Amino acid sequence: MGKLRIAEIFKSIQGEGTRAGLPCAFVRLAGCNLRCSYCDTDYAQDAQSGSEMGVDEVAAQVRDFGLPLVQITGGEPLLQPACAELIDILLEDGATVLLETNGSQDISVVDPRVIKIIDLKCPASGESGTIRRENIEQLHLNDEVKFVVSNRGDYEWAREVILRERLAEKCTILLSPASGELEPRKLAEWMLRDRLVARLQLQLHKIIWGDERSR
């Protein structure tokens, strides 16, 4: 069994995406290759932060929660090769596995049973040039693409990508206002005006607990 660098393992209410509101186990891997301007998990950026754990140890902690929904996130989880081992175990356990990735790593290596959530970085993030174009072609209908929108320019950029890549035919599209930078109402109005085939998402976990996370 391989080793993983773990920032934290916890249970909470899923705050984003099509499964928002469901109890979920979270495994946050340490280390990220990007430095987004709005990052709210900067404590997980350093690849040497957190604790080293065996894949079997991580899976055992997840099992103890007794929840059928598990999200692997980061950091950037695909930077750690042993992430694939963890995914295999969780799938064998019968869990529904979500994988949140920043879009810079190859997702073709991920088991197709995994629901991939790709965060396509808008210009205000400072990391929009890191998107791996091939990943868009690897999307399945059960996958999700998320845009964190900080301003009008970000929205127009996201709208262009959605239309150009015909994302509505490939996956679920999520638009999220960057916390403290864009009012949700304004983003909703833009989406309604353009009849954009996308889902407005607010971070439900932050509405409930603020910056804290349930355990």
Image (cartoon, rainbow, N blue to C red):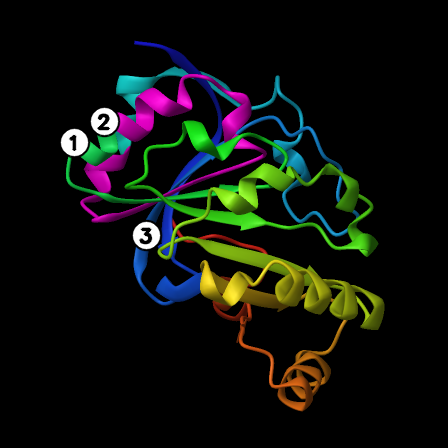
Q: Position of residue 36 (x, y in %)?
A: 75, 44
What secondary structure is marked by label 1? helix
Residue 105 vs residue 68, the one in the foreground = 105
The location of residue 188, given as percent across then percent down, is: 64, 83
Camera-nearest residue between 120 and 181: 120
Circle number at residue 109 = none
Label 2 element class: helix
For the residue marked with disc 2, what is the amino acid?
A: Ile
Q: Pointer 2: what residue?
A: 89
The answer to whether one can see residue 181 in this image is no
Question: Is residue 175 shown to the viewer in this render?
Answer: yes
Q: Residue at x 73, y 37 (%)?
A: 130
- The residue nearer to you, when weighing 173 against 125, is 173
Is there a contact, CB below 8 Å, between mark 1 and mark 2?
yes
Please state which of the two labelled residues, at mark 2 or mark 3, is closer to the viewer. 2
| Looking at the image, residue 4 lies above or below residue 76 | above
Q: Which residues are magenta?
A: 62-88
Mark 2 vs 3, N-terminal side: 3
Magenta stretch: residue 5 in it? no
Residue 13 appears at what percent x and percent y?
37, 60
Residue occupied by mark 1 = 92
Q: Which residue is mark 3?
A: 24
> Image point 68% across, 41% down: which residue?
131
Q: Is 31 situated left or right of 152 in this image?
A: left
- Please give the name of the residue rendered at 30% of the width and 58% of the height, measured from the top-left corner: 23
**Mark 2 vs mark 3, CA separation in Å:** 17 Å
Q: Amino acid at mark 3?
A: Cys
- The quarter holding residue 26 reads top left
